[in-house]
Image (cartoon, helix red, strand yellow):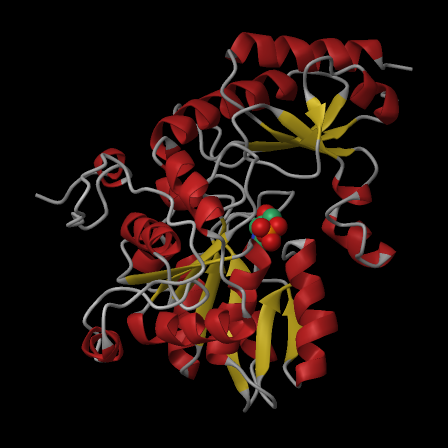
Amino acid sequence: MEKRFETIVLHNAKKENRPIKSKVTPIYQTSAFTFTDLEELEGFYQGEGNYLYSRTGNPNPDELGAAVAALERAPAGIATSSGLSSILAAVLAVAGSGDHIVAAEDLYGGSFHLLKEELSTLGIQTTFVSFSNPKEVADAIGENTKLLYSESITNPLLRVENIEAIVKIAKEHGLITLIDNTFATPYHINPYKLGVDLVIHSVTKYIGGHSDVTAGVVVGKEELVAKARAKVVNFGANVSPFEAWLTTRGLKTLAIRMKSQSYNARKLALALKENRHVKKVYYPFAESEAGFGAIVTIELAKSVDVNQFFRSLSWVKIAPTLAGVETSVSHPLKTSHRALPAEAQEALGITNEVVRISVGIEHEEDIIHTFEQAIENSVR
Ligand SMILES: *Cc1c(COP(=O)(O)O)cnc(C)c1O
């Protein structure tokens, strides 16, 4: 019988044959590995296990890459220094100078910037289109297009991508697909199982879960992940053993965190829907009792003083990140989407009144009460 998510999240690694049998993998905080003689060294190059140099491979990053691959039901994975470097490695595994990418116009701000400002200087051009409209995607594909790239749940307005439709278009045109699954996590969506070739995560977010690491991961088809691995090694985008170890530690509770956070998020979304000072609540699948994802984005009504609202949130911190076990809020217009042109902000619906709430594992009633109080305190 295939193991369930809650079990795989804990038991995904190969049983290691270590001389000292620690229950968890130790931190291999070393820059290199040693060899007893030239035969052993030659053995490394013949693929007989062991490690050489931490930039090219280390047990802790390898454990993280394999763990996320197991949860995504993908054959291979490689950990990287950040979510952005995982995107860089994934894109460069597929596209080079002269190639073209079709990407969703509502990508995470940093990813948009990487494609538009940096990869363009390497000769990789990107056309940004609305992925809610498959025809727009298909129309943007040209002779030199190599990659379709989107996010399973978008930031901050939580548009749920139609992954099957994208995979279908990609197959028709012989293209590779890349999905950023950071917001959904493999607990809710498995893009690889839906036919996606490469999946990335900013493991800084839910995979790590405790707001104490910056790291990323690329998982997917073996030959593509091998190419991404070469980019990580050659660009020096490897993650440190300690960061990888911390992330792997955080990952163990992903199932119970997502269960609790998604449940709380839905409860908060339903409560705020009833509030007359909240103009709009973005939350996918609120009808499902278990909830779906732990981000709730709201648009406050004009009757609310937005800055006063942020000041009134007592224990809820303002932080330009998401996904920790503690509830936090961010202001997309002035942080994640600050770099977008004003027309794009407006077209996407990211106004000054939009607040992104990353719901944590506190008691649902305390969360709801705190937001209701903050709104009440800031009505003009
Ligand atoms: C945060 C984030 C990234 C970038 O990840 P870093 O770890 O900050 O480099 C990419 N995509 C999404 C959806 C994110 O939320």
From this view, report whether residue 104 is shown above or below residue 342. Answer: below
- Position of residue 72 relative to residue 37, above or below, is above
Residue 39: quarter of image: bottom left
The residue nearer to you, when weighing 149 against 271, is: 149
Instruction: Choose between 249 and 330: the one closer to the eye.
Output: 249
Residue 105 in view here: no
> Does 374 sit left or right of 281 as displayed?
right
Q: How far across and down, in percent of the image, does residue 184 sit?
A: 46, 43
Quadrant containing the C terminus in the rendered view: top right
Q: Is residue 307 left or right of residue 363?
A: right
Query: Can the viewer see residue 304?
Result: yes
Q: Nearer the viewer, residue 221 or 35?
A: 35
Q: Residue furthest front?
A: 37
Q: Residue furthest right?
A: 380
- Please tell me in which quadrant of the rendered image residue 117 appears: bottom right
Name the residue located 73 percent from the left edge and 8 percent from the top edge.
Answer: 373
User: What percent of the width, then of the height, locates residue 98?
Assistant: 61, 90
